[in-house]
Image (cartoon, rainbow, N blue to C red):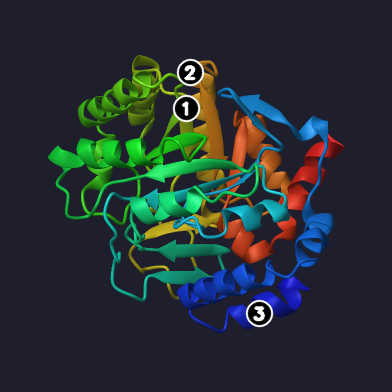
Amino acid sequence: MYKTIIRPFFFKFDPEKVHEFTFALLKNLFRIPLLKSLVRSSFVIEDKRLERELMGIKFKNPVGLAAGFDKNAVLFDEFSNYGFGFVEIGTVTPKPQPGNEKKRIFRLPEDGGLINRMGFNNEGVDAVVSRLKKRRTDIIIGGNIGKNKTTPNENAVSDYLICFEKLFDCVDYFVVNVSSPNTPDLRALQDKEPLTRLLNALQEANKKRPVQKPVLLKIAPDLSNDQLLDIIDIVKSTQIAGIIATNTTLSREGLSSVHKNETGGLSGKPLTQRSTEVIRFLAERSNKAFVIIGVGGIHSDKDAIEKLRAGADLIQIYTGFVYEGPSIVKRINTGLLRL
């Protein structure tokens, strides 16, 4: 029903407005007493064979919702009813910011992709913390953190530390986002010296806590092999828990959509192959020395299995959720059980 009725209807309207409408609708629908049980019975698969224990965290299954979908931590409890093993909120910045000018999301249905240039629009870390403190489920939550647009790169460490300290008691793991293409000069923080300084600062703050939280780094798919080797060295030297591979791409190779020349990050099927290549390179060259969460172009159980076979320990979906609907989570977990 989703792909034949709901998606064609939603795709007639602006993507961001549909997103906001859907969030408001789900928030209200899940207040209906029996709906939660009905949705869970339709989408959730509970099976010990799906469980993963990584970074000191037990995941009920390896399928997560990627950052950017529930950036303000509005529906993380509700998304647990669709069978996700974990939900990553954010990217969160210290201060609220509106992001880039609209229109800033473009569907590419011919290519199975999305282009976005959101620009870390979010309500700020304090608003997110207030919602996370009201968590009603045991869903694993990741906190994806970034810097405000107006903060210069030389002061970026302080922004990440603010988010880290405020979110610490509310999330299960952290993700450092220096790879979004939609905040000016942000990707310069992926260079070896500034990135090492940033991750060391976060790890120093982490070690001051009685119990530490895993810290992962989210990287761009557009890095060269030499840059990826630098990333491996940085992960090992800073002793962070792992990598999320990958964020959106600036590449437009092979696109046919009328929106192919829009600026921003491209996600979805056009990213499938490249993100898998990055995962495989990191896994092989590091000898699987750290956790890898695979994301990028997962639209089926086959795509998810390819990521896991390439070396991913967990996977996340975003654009696939938009194109395939909520049943994709169940299809992936069912496909994994067939193995």
Q: Classify 10 Å Cα crowding around label 1: few (below 14), some (14-19), many (20 and above).
A: some
**Whether residue 27 is situated above or below residue 243 in the rendered picture:** below
Q: Amino acid at mark 2?
A: Ser
Mark 1 element type: loop
What residue is disc 2 on?
A: 286
What residue is disc 3 on?
A: 8
- Residue 89 point in image, percent of width and height: 48, 50
Mark 3 vs mark 1: in front? 1
- Residue 162 point in image, percent of width and height: 28, 40
Q: Quadrant of residue 313?
A: top right
What residue is disc 1 on?
A: 214
**CA separation in Å, label 3 and label 2:** 43 Å
Q: Residue at x 68, y 72 (%)?
A: 29
- Residue 27 point in image, percent of width and height: 60, 68
Q: Amino acid at mark 3?
A: Pro
**CA separation in Å, label 3 and label 1:** 40 Å
Q: Amino acid at mark 1?
A: Pro
Q: Residue at x 65, y 42 (%)?
A: 138
Q: Pick whichever of labels 3 and 1 is earlier in the sequence.
A: 3
Q: Pick whichever of labels 2 and 1 is earlier in the sequence.
A: 1
Judge from the rendering whether residue 241 lies leftward or rightward of residue 54; answer left or right. Answer: left
Mark 2 element type: helix
Q: Classify 10 Å Cα crowding around label 3: few (below 14), some (14-19), many (20 and above).
A: few
Q: Quadrant of residue 82?
A: bottom right
Please name whichever residue, 314 or 129, is drawn nearer the observer in this view of the structure: 129
Does the rendering let one see residue 253?
A: no
Mark 2 vs mark 1: in front? 1
